[in-house]
């Protein structure tokens, strides 16, 4: 693996034994054996090609907003598409953005150009690639409403385009496939900058009042069960504030698990299991996780 490290270090910025807790919004996760942050598609392709050559199975992440990483860490190459992979370009009512672009930055670009339709995503703490992958949504909007094309690398590292995304609740064409999203094209509508700004501010206020955004979390832990709201079921089960180790069911919104102090992956998994068991016993509903577990 020493030679592998030397080879990938020639391609882009790479660190060894990088704590994944620094790269997830949960602030949880052991070290990644190698952690790379490519700035271009060429660097990304070169990293993936080198991993293939050395028979290393890489893990590609965005900004870590929906991830729960194992305490033991990841004995492989983690490729982070984040700040260095975040170009945003506006052409008329279209926005082209790289996979690592934050949704908040795209929202600001839309606001600056008086484009409406992206307000719902302005407060989602994630990247465009992850949002497309899982058809992220909030407050009545989803990525399916605005994404018309995405770009990805296939298993042979060839660049491809996707226009039929097969979007459904927290799923897309990419779900379960070994494809790497590199960017997307978003189509919005012309609007009034003040109205757009006001709408974004109103949603931000709503988030501050109803979600524990000041504490480390991975957002909503569970998918919405048909006919119910996960947070309501958890609250009705009397689990608000329930804690295992440093992991706690938020007292502000029961659909969130927060890192209340040095929580481990084991703590969170134990709490998830307890929530699922308790809610099922009370309501007969088995909650399905939305957060992605790695390692």
Image (tube, rainbow, N blue to C red):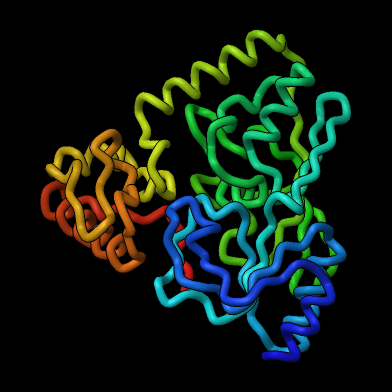
Residue 244 screen position, x and y as percent: 20, 58
Residue 72 screen position, x and y as percent: 42, 77
Give the residue at x 36% y 49%: 222
Q: Is residue 208 left or right of residue 160?
A: left
Whether residue 171 is visible, yes or no, is: yes
Give the residue at x 83% y 72%: 11
Q: Is residue 241 left or right of residue 45?
A: left
Residue 53 screen position, x and y as percent: 78, 87
Whether residue 228 is visible, yes or no, is: no
- Judging depth in this view, the residue of 189 and 265 nearest the camera is 265
Give the residue at x 43% y 50%: 218
Q: What is the number of callouts on the image?
A: 0
Q: Is residue 128 left or right of residue 279?
A: right
Residue 163 screen position, x and y as percent: 76, 47
Give the residue at x 51% y 56%: 24
- Judging depth in this view, the residue of 171 and 127 nearest the camera is 127
Q: Is residue 146 left or right of residue 274?
A: right
Res 126 → quadrant: top right
Q: Is residue 203 above or below residue 252?
A: above
Which quadrant is the N terminus positioned in? bottom right
Q: Is residue 131 above or below residue 181?
A: above
């Amino acid at each position: 693996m020493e030679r592998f490290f030397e080879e990938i270090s020639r391609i882009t910025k790479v660190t060894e034994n990088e704590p994944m807790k620094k790269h997830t919004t949960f602030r949880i996760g052991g070290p990644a054996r190698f952690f790379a942050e490519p700035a271009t598609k060429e660097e990304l392709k070169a990293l993936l090609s080198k991993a293939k050559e050395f028979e290393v199975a890489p893990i590609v992440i965005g900004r870590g907003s929906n991830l729960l990483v194992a305490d033991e860490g990841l004995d492989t190459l983690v490729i982070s598409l984040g700040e260095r992979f975040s170009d945003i370009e506006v052409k008329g009512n279209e926005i082209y953005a790289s996979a690592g672009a934050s949704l908040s930055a795209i929202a600001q670009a839309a606001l600056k150009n008086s484009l409406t339709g992206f307000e719902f995503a302005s407060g989602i703490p994630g990247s465009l690639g992850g949002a497309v992958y899982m058809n992220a949504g909030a407050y009545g909007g989803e990525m399916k409403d605005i994404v018309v094309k995405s770009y990805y690398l296939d298993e042979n590292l060839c660049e491809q385009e996707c226009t039929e995304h097969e979007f459904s609740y927290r799923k897309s064409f990419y779900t379960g496939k070994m494809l790497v999203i590199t960017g997307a094209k978003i189509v919005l509508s012309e609007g009034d900058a003040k109205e757009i700004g006001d709408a974004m501010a109103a949603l931000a206020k709503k988030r501050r009042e109803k979600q524990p955004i000041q504490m480390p979390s991975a957002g909503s832990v569970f998918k919405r069960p048909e006919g119910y709201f996960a947070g309501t079921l958890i609250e009705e089960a009397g689990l608000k504030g329930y804690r295992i180790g440093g992991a706690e069911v938020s007292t502000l919104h029961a659909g969130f698990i927060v890192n209340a102090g040095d929580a481990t992956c084991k703590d969170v998994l134990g709490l998830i299991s307890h929530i699922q068991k308790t809610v099922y016993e009370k309501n007969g509903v088995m909650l399905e996780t939305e957060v992605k577990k790695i390692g």
